[in-house]
Image (cartoon, grey):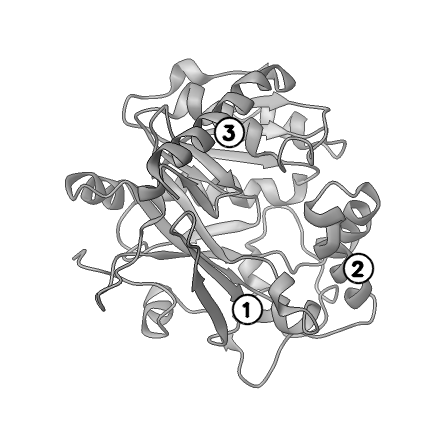
Amino acid sequence: MNALRLRAIRQWYLGRAIRRHKQVVPVKLRVRTIGHNALLCFVTLRNEYVRLPYFLDYYRRMGIGHFLIVDNNSDDGSAEFLQSQPDVSLWRTTTSYKSSRFGMDWINWLLFRYGTGHWCLTVDPDEFLVFPNCDTRPLQALTHWMSASGIRSFPAMLLDLYPRGRIGDQPYVAGQNPMEIAHYFDPANYMIHKNGRYGNLWIQGGPRARSFFASSPKEAPALNKIPLIRWERHYVYISSTHMALPRALNLVYDENGGERISGVLLHAKFLSTLIEKSSEEMQRGEHYANSVEYRAYNQELHSDMVLLTPESRSFEDWRQLEELGLMSLGNWV
């Protein structure tokens, strides 16, 4: 696809986000407190109160300076909790998640308006970034190095975590580290191919592919993400955080046999809260392909399935993931 065509696509998505900016209504804005070099975190959520205390603490410890959050009409206390947090700016919307391209119109607007010139992390409340040296260095150390190296985007494979037994056996409570319950993962058996149009890698596999989409693996959720970008006003996410434009933001791998730095997003979806969540989202039908993913969850979770296999590994640290080839230190020392 030629550069002019890609530019037109980028401008269309950006224009779409700007036109829909009135769908997100300010509830509590603290954006004036954002420092010049602050790392920003962008989130869209609905009814995630139980996850929020640990999620915010995790990323505060990592070095996030401000959270910009869109609440999609929660009724579980999420909005009230977020309003009380001094480093959170909150917007609320009652419009359709599906019609907003699954929240990306809202996020692209906030990135356009507030993200320019900042390193911006865009994640869900059940995603926890792990990067090389994250046990000894803050996220700012990574972003400073990437800026000095001319690197504008940072990829992270989504790594699904799951518990030893049935999903609902151990109730998850607010403030708890979800990895205390769900800490097993699939170390291999991932499928990768290159997206010829946008240049990004497309990764599928893991427990969701083998357990929920075994009969149709090509329909399994994508695991490739580019969650961390030094944002500019003309940037835009195209499909969740799986890919972005300009196209160069997606070229985060080495096609000549070398390695570039990458991370992992620990995906703590498979907690007891998923059983109720899957029922709600299946009824709402607001997710991709008429919530086909949540329909698969709902059917299998009520059969008391267990995701653990003899090949499963228990998560230890980033070094373990690097040794398994799931992330890379690249040439960052």
Cβ–Cβ under 8 Å for marks 3 and 1: no
- Image coordinates of residue 116 in percent, x first then y, are 35, 24
Q: Nearer the viewer, residue 20 or 262?
A: 20
The quarter of the picture where residue 40 lies is top left
Instruction: Give amino acid for label 3.
Output: Tyr
Describe the element under mark 2 as helix, strand or loop: helix
Whether residue 17 is visible, yes or no, is: yes
Residue 44 vs 262, above or below: the answer is above
Residue 158 vs 34, above or below: the answer is below
Cβ–Cβ under 8 Å for marks 1 and 2: no
Distance of mark 3 from mark 2, alpha carbons?
A: 32 Å
- Say left or right for 316 vs 278: left
Q: Residue at x 76, y 47 (%)?
A: 290
Residue that numbered label 3 is attached to: 13
- Image quarter in which the N terminus is found: top left
Q: Residue at x 75, y 61 (%)?
A: 296
Classify mark 1: residues with Cα within 10 Å, few (<14), some (14-19) or many (20+): many
Distance of mark 3 from mark 1, alpha carbons?
A: 29 Å
**Circle 3 or circle 2, nearest the eye:** 3
Dot placed on the residue nearer the N-terminal end, 3 or 1: 3
Dot placed on the residue nearer the N-terminal end, 3 or 2: 3
**Circle 3 or circle 1, nearest the eye:** 3
For residue 298, which numbered disc appears in the image? 2
For residue 205, which numbered disc appears in the image? 1
Dot placed on the residue nearer the N-terminal end, 1 or 2: 1
